Image (cartoon, rainbow, N blue to C red):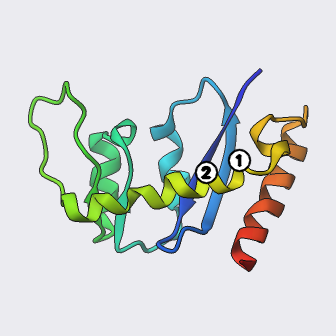
Amino acid sequence: MTTKIHVCVEGLGQAARFLLTGGHCHDVTQAEALLKDLQPGAVLADKAYDANALIARIQERNAKVVIPSKSNRKEPREIDAFQYRNRNVIERFFARIKQFRRIATRYDKLASRFASFFAIVASFEWLK
């Protein structure tokens, strides 16, 4: 069985919140839980998060939506390309945590242990 780590990363590249789900779970279904109780100035994400319901919820919070449109969207949205460049912060976060072999190879069989170790790794990242 596979698992996915869904992470909300703040502007300096540190994990603000994370969720662990089954590998079959789509990314956009976890976005609301990740953003719960947060007041972001902008939400940067990839095309997997391009959903009208999510975009409306982000706009209700008066946050800027920086999510590119999927190729099959009938009315593509314009995004701030300059701000979208900062999405690499998220990719760099995942590159840093994958330096921990236990995270990269998923040695832990139990999801609770995997989530616990991920929390430890995220704490190490905060201390750097």
Residue 70 vs 118, above or below: the answer is: above
**Left or right placement of residue 100 versus residue 9 in this view:** right
Seen at 90% across and 37% down, the residue is 108
Q: Please identify the quadrant where the N terminus is shown.
A: top right
Q: Position of residue 35 (x, y in %)?
A: 50, 60
**Left or right placement of residue 80 versus residue 104 in this view:** left
Q: Position of residue 118 (x, y in %)?
A: 78, 54
Q: Quadrant of residue 87?
A: bottom left
Amino acid carrying mark 1 in the image: Lys
Seen at 80% across and 34% down, the residue is 105
Return the residue found at the far bottom: 127
Q: Position of residue 127 (x, y in %)?
A: 75, 79
Amino acid carrying mark 2 in the image: Phe
Q: Position of residue 11 (x, y in %)?
A: 47, 72
How much space separates mark 2 and mark 1, taking CA atoms?
A: 6 Å
Q: Quadrant of residue 97?
A: bottom right
- Cβ atoms at labels 2 and 1 below 8 Å apart: yes
Seen at 30% across and 69% down, the residue is 63
Judging from the image, what secondary structure is the residue with disc 2 in? helix
Return the residue found at the far left: 75
Judging from the image, what secondary structure is the residue with disc 1 in? loop
Q: Can you identify the residue that label 2 sits on?
A: 94
Return the residue found at the far front: 99
Q: Residues within 10 Å of mark 1 (few under 14, many from 20)?
A: some
Mark identifier at residue 98: 1
